[in-house]
Amino acid sequence: MKKALKFDERDNVVIALEATVPGDEISVNGEASGVTAADSVPQGHKIALRNIAKGETIYKYGHPIGLAAENISAGSYVHVHNVLDPISNWKENYLYQYNPDSLTEIDDSLRLAEPPKLYGYRRRDGRVGFRNHLVVLSTAVCANKIVSDIEYKFRDVVAITNPSGCVILPNEVERIKAILLGIARNPNVGAVIFAGLGCESVEAEWFYDQVKDEKPCAFVRSQNYGSTEAAYEDLEKLVISMKAELDKQQREGVSVADICLGVKCGASDWTTAVASNPAIGYASDIVVKNGGTSLLGETVGWYGGEGVLTKQSRTKETADKIIDMLTVMYDRAKSMGRSIEESNPAPGNIAGGITTLKEKALGNVKKGGTAPVEGALDFGEYPTGKGLYVVDNPGLDPLSLLGLTCSGATVLLYSTGRGTPVGNPIAPAIKLTGSPDAMKLMGANMDADLTGISLGHMSIAEGGRLLFDKIVAACNGEPTIAEKLGHREYAFPLLMGAL
């Protein structure tokens, strides 16, 4: 008898926890179902639990995820060949479920009786970093050479180059400001040097003026030196001086309330929604329940899950802004003659058992846990209080992770279903998977193995507490695998590029 998983009583499909062939009997949540497999179904893909008529709604997680494109008999394989995505015109059919009367708080069982001991670097603004990076930021592509040379010589310095910085539209000027200031202000950054040319759209000195009162800060402009070689010599002297200053700083006792967690998923498959993301949500709830902050990004991953986010919103203003964020992105795609629905799910998602955009989104938003959404942040905007916030940033993995750090995330939980090695230059990225395949293919890049949840040997709560322990260890200085291997991937979200 082959095992299958059913999430909710309303579901008319189940997840094959084992690959099936025609004739296999199916047990659902450990009990005989009376259903026999009619098709060969890969592990993690969906099987019809009963007959589903053409046009009937298909339910998973207790939510509609698609419409039957044809009559589907009990035991049949349910996937892209016989399912229509319910999101064909999102802007006219989105779910808005804000209701203050239905808002629930995190369960009291997640309050820690004995909070862990944590140690971090208290910054001038009161925020706490768990790394003490010296960061050198290029303000324009013309300054990238000297910044790259610093990274080559000083491997412990975080050097971030810039793909643009000049001849760009005003909205992209604002985006460059948000990125560089967001990075510079992250509490994991102990000191920062801005390196520019001197004639770019936003000069290095402007950034210096914004940050100089917050932390040790400096800038160089190559045009002031007569050559890039001379500018590099001065930049190197600044690096050596600031490294010595950072070496004098000591960790002090802090608390879970000082954690700013960023949550992310990438290369999703069936295990992402079954195991990894619910466990991330549980860990996020622990952080928030104990006074901390959690950030949920990937705006493009919310289409189809906006009903969940608006229902969890603390205020109508937050719910409205979530819809506004999604609408802006939707309209931007339409202005290019395309639609969001064309971009998701990706081929890897489909191969991993995800059939529709809505199905993917409902798994994506599980990373936020059960906490009320306290606010919706623009790219580079920092939270004004504690709790769960959503952040408007793209879905590309290194770009989304950077976006979370640009809003203050100091530690990252990053799930993958298909396998990815990506890290981040500013915050430790704790990589995890619930996929047996991903553990076989890229287990050496994973900090946490949650395959026990997918295979029925571990509960969501156990997985969530395992991840919380990983957060504590990373915050106290234990390097993640991505840090050990030198993964510092990042990307900038330029809309148009150079004109």
Image (tube, rainbow, N blue to C red):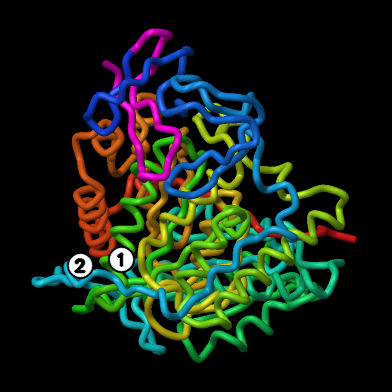
Q: Main secondary structure of the magenta part?
A: loop
Pick the quarter of the image with the N terminus.
Answer: top left
- Residue 285 is labelled as 1
Asked whether, in this view, residue 227 is left or right of residue 22, the answer is: right
User: What is the CA distance from the residue labelled 1 to the residue labelled 2?
Assistant: 7 Å
Of 145 and 202, which appears nearest the observer? 202
Q: Is there any visible trace of residue 240 in the rendered image? A: no
Question: Which residue corresponds to the image point at 59% horizontal and 30% vertical from the top-left?
Answer: 53
In terms of depth relative to the viewer, which is nearer, 76 or 115? Answer: 76
Is residue 65 shown in magenta? Answer: no
Residue that appears at 24% across and 35% down:
452
Residue 177 appears in view:
yes
Quarter-wise, where is residue 441 in the image?
top left
Give x and y (percent) for residue 481: 34, 44
* Circle 2 residues within 10 Å: few <14, some 14–19, many ≥20: some
The residue at 60%/60% (across/down) is 299
In depth, the one of 483 and 345 nearer the eye is 345
* Residue type beneath disc 1: Asp
| Mark 1 element type | helix
**Are there few (<14), some (14-19), or many (20+) residues within 10 Å of tag 1?**
many
User: Which stretch appears magenta?
Assistant: 1-24
Mark 1–mark 2 contact, CB under 8 Å?
A: yes
Q: Position of residue 182 (x, y in %)?
A: 56, 73
Kindly identify which numbered label has been placed on residue 180.
Answer: none
Residue at the bottom extreme, as displayed: 213
The quarter of the image holding the C terminus is: bottom right
Q: Quadrant of residue 181?
A: bottom right
**Percent position (x, y) of residue 245?**
37, 78
